[in-house]
């Protein structure tokens, strides 16, 4: 969409930038925990691609924060359903966990997708879900979550939940538990 020429004449000091440039600038300058949600959102919205972000990143060599952008751009994905899921994925990455599958479908006995996990390590049958306040608006949602958890547990999945406290505070305990479960279950 082209800008209105009258607006440009009245405000020539306003800069325009493309989505790739904006995304890379933000990847360089935002706090680390906020970068992946922004990058994921650009891919989900279709305004950037992994290739276009990588091409733009080259133009930022030598600028402050480029090392952070270089590390996090390859992690961007279209799978997360929320910014908190993106943050949770970054925390797992920073803890050295293997790369999870996003929105992993869990199949029933007939091979049909029955449940989806925010983050999942399929071979080990370990799942990690973001459990936000907004996801428990009523008793029906709580019951549904419990049935879902029970079904997954009955199917031999080790399930873990992350809250805002895990994301913004002490995530080491949770990521340690997830790592131990992946290690233990991968040996079977």
Image (cartoon, rainbow, N blue to C red):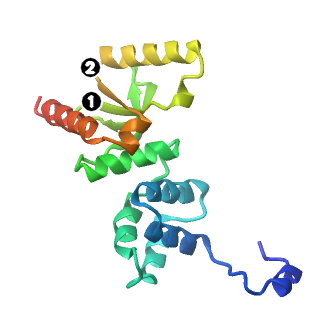
Label located before the other in sequence (1 or 2): 1
Residue 182 visible in the shown view: yes
- The residue to which callout 2 is attached is 156
Q: Are marks 1 and 2 in contact (CB under 8 Å)?
A: yes
Badge 2: few (under 14), some or many (20 or more) residues near its Cα, within 10 Å? few
Name the one closer to the observer, 101 or 112.
101
Residue 109 visible in the shown view: no
Quadrant including the C terminus: top left
Name the one closer to the observer, 141 or 65.
65
Location of residue 57 by image quarter: bottom left
Q: Residue at x 39, y 28 (%)?
A: 106
Q: Which mark is residue 125?
A: 1
**Up/down of 179 relative to 161, above or below:** below
Q: Which residue is drawn at 34% across and 66% down?
A: 71
**140 with respect to 154 (left or right):** right
**Up/down of 25 relative to 150, above or below:** below
Name the one closer to the observer, 184 or 122.
184
Image spot of residue 36 (x, y percent): 44, 56
**139 with respect to 76 (left or right):** right
Image spot of residue 56 (x, y percent): 48, 77
Distance of mark 1 from mark 2, alpha carbons? 7 Å
Image spot of residue 81 (x, y percent): 52, 41
Q: Which residue is at the far left?
A: 187
Quadrant including the N terminus: bottom right
Task: Label 1, secondary structure: give it.
Answer: loop
Q: Residue at x 60, y 63 (%)?
A: 47
């Amino acid at each position: 969409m082209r800008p209105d020429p009258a607006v440009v004449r009245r405000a020539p000091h306003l800069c325009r930038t493309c989505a790739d440039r904006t995304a890379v600038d933000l990847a360089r300058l935002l706090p680390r925990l906020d970068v992946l949600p922004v990058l994921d959102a650009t891919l989900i919205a279709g305004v950037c691609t992994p290739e276009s972000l990588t091409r733009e990143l080259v133009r930022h060599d030598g600028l402050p924060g480029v090392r952070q952008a270089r590390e996090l751009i390859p992690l961007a994905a279209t799978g997360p359903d929320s910014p908190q899921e993106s943050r949770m994925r970054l925390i797992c990455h920073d803890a050295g966990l293997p790369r999870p599958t996003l929105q992993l479908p869990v199949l029933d006995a007939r091979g049909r997708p029955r449940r989806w996990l925010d983050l999942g390590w399929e071979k080990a049958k370990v799942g990690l879900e973001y459990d936000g306040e907004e996801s428990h608006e009523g008793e029906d949602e709580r019951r549904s979550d419990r049935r879902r958890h029970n079904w997954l547990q009955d199917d031999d999945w080790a399930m873990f939940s992350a809250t805002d406290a895990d994301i913004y505070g002490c995530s080491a305990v949770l990521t340690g538990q997830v790592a131990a479960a992946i290690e233990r279950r991968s040996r079977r």
